Amino acid sequence: MTSDPGVRALLPPLLAPAPDRPGPRDGAPLGDGPAPPFRGEALAPDPAAMRRVCGHFTTGVTVVTAVADEGWIGATVNSFTSVSLDPALVLFCLRHDSRLLTAIRTCGQFAVSILAAGQGPVAMDFAAKGLPSFDGLACLTGATGAPVLRDGVGYLECKLADEYPGGDHRIVVGAVTALGLLGDGAAAGPGGPLTFYRGRLARLDKECER
């Protein structure tokens, strides 16, 4: 989910299963040994099947921002994840023709705002066609100059560290230069973080026991 016409899908391409390895088997034991044949539905890995299956993987929702020639630019992204703690690295995916990607390449840095459950409208606005509007949004700026959405759960500021091809997307790796929680650090209120599941924005019901 992004504001760029070419980056509208919330679900980016995911890594395919390793070749020459068996798929999941119903009732397979943890160790070696015979198991009954897998009787699940096997789908060809076309875009529709990818969305159908990968849509069952719940993600958080972020807005990635940068400074472009025309001003602030941003897009809703749910492909965000941490990569390394030391050094601190994160990644996300954008369409290769994304205007946000062009801005990040030009300025060499960006910010990530982790959205709270009540920010569904913000996520949808930054996923719409055209340049997003920051009017009416409470924003903070740090060293990158990119806006951080004040009502989010947390934020990270990053320098562009690397970029890799990923099918019809580009995999963007950022080196974290600053980060923190927003508000009281309690996921911006009782609703917790905003999530995305099966093509819809959602919120956590409750945390599982540890």
Image: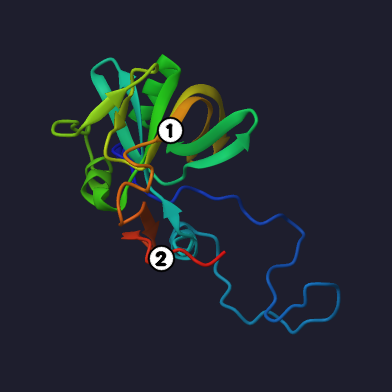
- Residue type for callout 1: Gly
Q: Nearer the viewer, residue 33 or 187?
A: 187
Examine the rendering and report whether any part of residue 167 can be seen: no
Examine the rendering and report whether any part of residue 184 can be seen: yes
Label 2 environment density (alpha carbons within 10 Å; few <14, some 14–19, many ≥20)? few
Return the x and y of residue 2 as percentages of the image width and height.
33, 41
- Residue type for callout 2: Lys
- Label 1: element kind: strand
Q: Nearer the viewer, residue 49 or 205?
A: 205
Report the residue at 54% width, 50% height from top. Answer: 14
Q: Residue furthest right?
A: 32
Return the x and y of residue 29 as percentages of the image width and height.
77, 77
Cα distance between the residues tagged 1 and 2: 23 Å
Q: Which label's residue is closer to the chain start, 1 or 2?
A: 1
Q: Which residue is mark 2?
A: 206
181 to 68, vertically: above or below: below
Q: Residue furthest bottom?
A: 36
90 to 18, vertically: above or below: above
Total residue callouts: 2
Return the x and y of residue 78 as percentages of the image width and height.
41, 46
Quarter where residue 64 is shown? top left
Quarter where residue 151 is shown? top left
Report the residue at 34% width, 60% height from top. Answer: 203
Return the x and y of residue 166 as percentages of the image width and height.
55, 39
* Residue 2 appears left or right of 17: left
Label 1 environment density (alpha carbons within 10 Å; few <14, some 14–19, many ≥20)? few
Q: Which residue is mark 1?
A: 180
Report the residue at 19% width, 31% height from top. Answer: 134
2 to 162, vertically: above or below: below
| Residue 207's disc number | none
* Residue 20 appears left or right of 88: right
